[in-house]
Amino acid sequence: MQGGSTRFSELANELAAVGRLFYARGWALGTSGNFSAVTSREPLRLAITASGVDKGLLAAEHILEIDGAAQAVAGAGRPSAETLLHLSVVRLRGAGAVLHTHSIWSNIVSGAGGGGVALEGHEMLKGLDGVATHEHREWLPVIDNSQDMPRLAQAVEQALRAHPQAHGFLLRRHGLYTWGRDLAEAKRHVEILEYLLEVTGRTAEDCYGHRKHT
């Protein structure tokens, strides 16, 4: 299948560039991570990364276009295994782009236990859409990972409904999902949240090391 729309072609190139950038930052090594952007609302269409592609080599030809039933309508290969999660976020948040990273710090922080991670008191929070002060408290729900994608999509939808102000969520020992009105905003949210997750992880690590040696 070949992608025909100018919108799809533009977003395929932009998603590939984002994927290579995230690979360079260590946020999507190997074949990890998946990225999407809405090409059409009516009918619903998403440009999304194909499964099993090295993100350091990601190119426009590795981007597919899917419909609202997660079926490929343009491009070659299989859609990401987590396509249903992208569709859930787009439908419930009205997102224009959804980005999923597999950084070391998101893995560590999400595996610490509990139902979520609180990020507060940091100036970088103001990089999130609608946040105007460092006093903001951002709650990232942590959802237990599963290879059963329909079941995982249901858990994601429950978390999104329970936390309507959240800018993202974590899959436990897996990675971060965030989104934006467009690809640029979603990319910024990844940068902000990955920074804050690293700060959180390093702070906990320092506190643990201090306790251990006192």
Image (cartoon, helix red, strand yellow):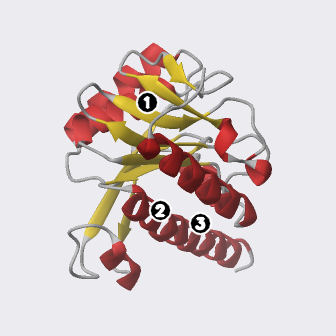
* Amino acid found under the numbered disc labelled 3: Gly
Q: How far apart are marks 2 and 1 (CA)?
A: 18 Å
* Amino acid found under the numbered disc labelled 2: Lys
Q: Could you say whether the residue bearing mark 1 is in a helix, strand or loop?
A: helix
Q: Which quarter of the figure has residue 14?
A: bottom right
Instruction: List x then y, in percent, for residue 98.
Output: 43, 46
Residue 163 shows up from this direction: yes
Task: Determine which residue is flagged by label 1.
Answer: 85
Going 74% across and 31% down the picture, which residue do you hit? 52
> Is residue 23 found left or right of 135 in the rendered image?
right
Instruction: List x then y, in percent, for residue 162.
Output: 21, 38
Q: Could you say whether the residue bearing mark 3 is in a helix, strand or loop?
A: helix
40 lies above or below 211:
above
Q: Which of marks 1 and 3 is in front?
A: 1
Going 52% across and 19% down the picture, which residue do you hit? 72
Q: Could you say whether the residue bearing mark 2 is in a helix, strand or loop?
A: helix
Q: How far apart are marks 1 and 3 (CA)?
A: 25 Å
* Amino acid found under the numbered disc labelled 1: Leu
Q: Which quarter of the figure has residue 106?
A: bottom right
Mark 1 / mark 3, whichever is N-terminal: 1
Task: Determine which residue is flagged by label 2.
Answer: 187
Task: Determine which residue is flagged by label 3.
Answer: 201
Check contact, mark 2 vs mark 3: CB within 8 A: no
